[in-house]
Image (cartoon, grey):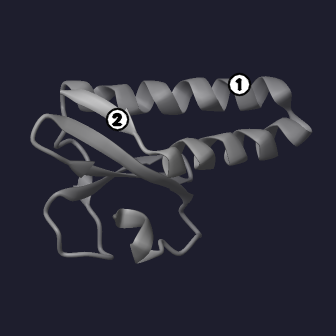
Amino acid sequence: MKVFWSSLAMDRVAEIGSYIAEDNPVASDEWVHKIFARVGQLEHFPESGRHISETRRKDIRELVWGNYRIIYRLETKRVAILTVRHMKQMLPIEELK
């Protein structure tokens, strides 16, 4: 299955990476590398994430990685990464579109 990153998800990764880089550029590079590696599992195991509590939709799932939620949508031929949020942040429903 192909993995597609939305522009919002890519922006979130860039923002988080920049924030981490303010204190530790090496840790930021590692974090970015590892989040892409974590999402890579969805190519072979697209249903490995759990359903999220914010919606009853069966096609919206999340991977939990460290303190972050990787929110994605299962589609017919691809997995769409919708957003990345810190666990303490509210998930705006409009980010699931």
Q: Nearer the viewer, residue 65 or 36?
A: 36
Question: Image point 19% across, 47% down: which residue?
Answer: 74
Relative to 37, is 90 on the left or the right?
Answer: right
**What residue is rendered at 30% in x and 31% in y?**
3
Callout 2 amino acid: Phe
Taking 56 as reference, is 62 above or below it? Answer: above
Residue 2 is situated, as x and y percent measured from the top left of the image, at 24, 27
In the foreground, 65 or 13: 13
Relative placement, left or right, of 41 versus 68 is left
The CA distance from mark 2 to mark 1 is 21 Å
Q: Which mark is residue 4?
A: 2
Which residue is tagged 1?
29
Image quadrant occupied by the N terminus: top left
Q: Residue at x 74, y 31 (%)?
A: 28
| Amino acid residing under circle 1 | Asp
- Relative height, residue 93 to residue 16 (above, below): below
In which quadrant is the C terminus drawn? bottom left
Looking at the image, residue 55 sits to the left or right of residue 39; the answer is left
Locate residue 50, reporting x and y percent: 24, 55
Task: Looking at the picture, tell me which residue is in the foreground, 7 or 15.
Answer: 7
Q: Closer to us: mark 2 or mark 1? A: 2
* Rendered view: 30 above or below 86: above
Q: Are marks 2 and 1 in contact (CB under 8 Å)?
A: no
Mark 2: secondary structure: strand
Residue drawn at x 25%, y 52% is: 73
Q: Quick one: label 2 or label 1, which is nearer the N terminus? A: 2
Helix, strand or loop status at disc 1: helix
- Tell me, for residue 14, which label it has, or none: none
Q: Position of residue 83 (x, y in %)?
A: 46, 53
Q: Looking at the image, how many numbered discs can be counted on the residues? A: 2
